[in-house]
Image: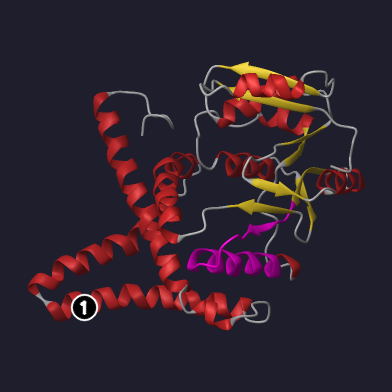
Amino acid sequence: QSYRDREIILVDDGSTDGTHKVADDLSAGRKDVTVVETNHGGASHARNVGVEKAKGEIVFFAESDCVYDESYLQKAVERLDSEPEAGAVCLTGAPLITRSTLATKSIDIENKVQHRLLDQGKIKPFYAWVYRREVLTKLGGFDEKLFQGEDKDLFDRLEGAHYTVAWVPGVNWRHRRDQTTPELARKWFTRGRTRILYSMKHGRILDILKTMAPFWVAVFGVILLVRSPLGGGLVILLVALLFVANTLRIMRIAWPVVERKRNFLGYPVFVMTRNFSMAMGYSVALVMILVRKIQGKEIAWNNI
């Protein structure tokens, strides 16, 4: 990073694979690196421990699956300096594409849509990984009961406390993601299963229903096919048309910035796979939550 006035805090969240020794070896002799070891408590816990150890006025949470532009920190600090009322800063990024697949093409389309809407002022920054330390303290840090959506939860509380969010446009980092739809489907299932606690905390029941409804309507359509091929076929067609309509909406926004228009052809399949995978995750989580409530047991990210 071009910005050199910084400290690096590495929190080993109870790893069992030799990470701590590797971290100690790499940081040996470096005064700007602090290695902390904790019992396994999840990413939120690890980040909160890091904030407690931090001495700086600004905190940046680096993600292991991201590649950052060398000026990332410099831009973040300068933007916060220029906007003293901002509690955090959003630096937009893009996916790191290593293979040309349906998944990478679709993710690229959605990323371009987000950038275009931000540039047009139709949406506001909706995430941040760089915060003022005093703001993090006032907000109480990350919610350690959450495993998925914990960053969104913190951002929601930031906005709820009426802090503004600064914004650095452009591609300032690239996110390493799974490159195929089946790989992402497994991750979306897990995300749905664990993100439900965030959705329930913020009363986003409608979001859960909107994700689950197409999936269960499609399941109903498949079952109905046995007794009424016409009726079942119409139900399945209705669900398919829903995803096509969503594609047309995205196309209207992304058309000027997507060079290969044929990339839109497979987009409905991508969105349908994501929706169905997350819907299955939500469904499993709801069943597990119900069972634990009946049993009178605690509900947390690591037991659903």
The colour scheme used here is secondary structure
Residue at the image position 33 percent from the left and 51 percent from the top: 280
* Most distant residue in the left direction: 227
Q: Splitting the image into 4 quarters, where does residue 273 fall?
A: bottom left
- Residue 247 at what x, y percent from top left? 49, 76
Magenta part of the chain? 91-117
Question: Residue 95 magenta-drawn?
Answer: yes
Left or right: residue 251 versus residue 74 is left
Q: Splitting the image into 4 quarters, where does residue 168 fall?
A: bottom right
Question: Where 157 sits versus 231, above or below?
Answer: above
Q: Please tell me which residue lies in front, 281 or 292.
A: 281
Question: Where 181 sits versus 17, above or below?
Answer: below
Left or right: residue 186 versus residue 218 is right
Q: Splitting the image into 4 quarters, where does residue 39 fall?
A: top right
- Residue 79 at what x, y percent from top left? 87, 49
Left or right: residue 2 versus residue 256 is right
Q: Tell me the quadrant of the picture where the C terminus can be found.
A: top left
Question: Residue 215 magenta-drawn?
Answer: no
Residue at the image position 18 percent from the left and 74 percent from the top: 232
Using the rendered image of the protein, determine whether residue 87 is visible from the camera's viewpoint. yes
- Residue 167 at what x, y percent from top left? 78, 54
Mark 1 residue type: Gly
- Residue 195 at what x, y percent from top left? 46, 43
Residue at the image position 21 percent from the left and 78 percent from the top: 233
Residue at the image position 50 percent from the left and 35 percent from the top: 147
Q: Tell me the quadrant of the picture where the N terminus can be found.
A: top right
Disc 1: which residue: 233
Secondary structure at numbered mark 1 = helix
Using the rendered image of the protein, determine whether residue 209 is visible from the camera's viewpoint. no
Mark 1, Cα crowd under 10 Å, few <14 / some 14-19 / many 20+, is some
Question: Where 11 sits versus 203, above or below?
Answer: above
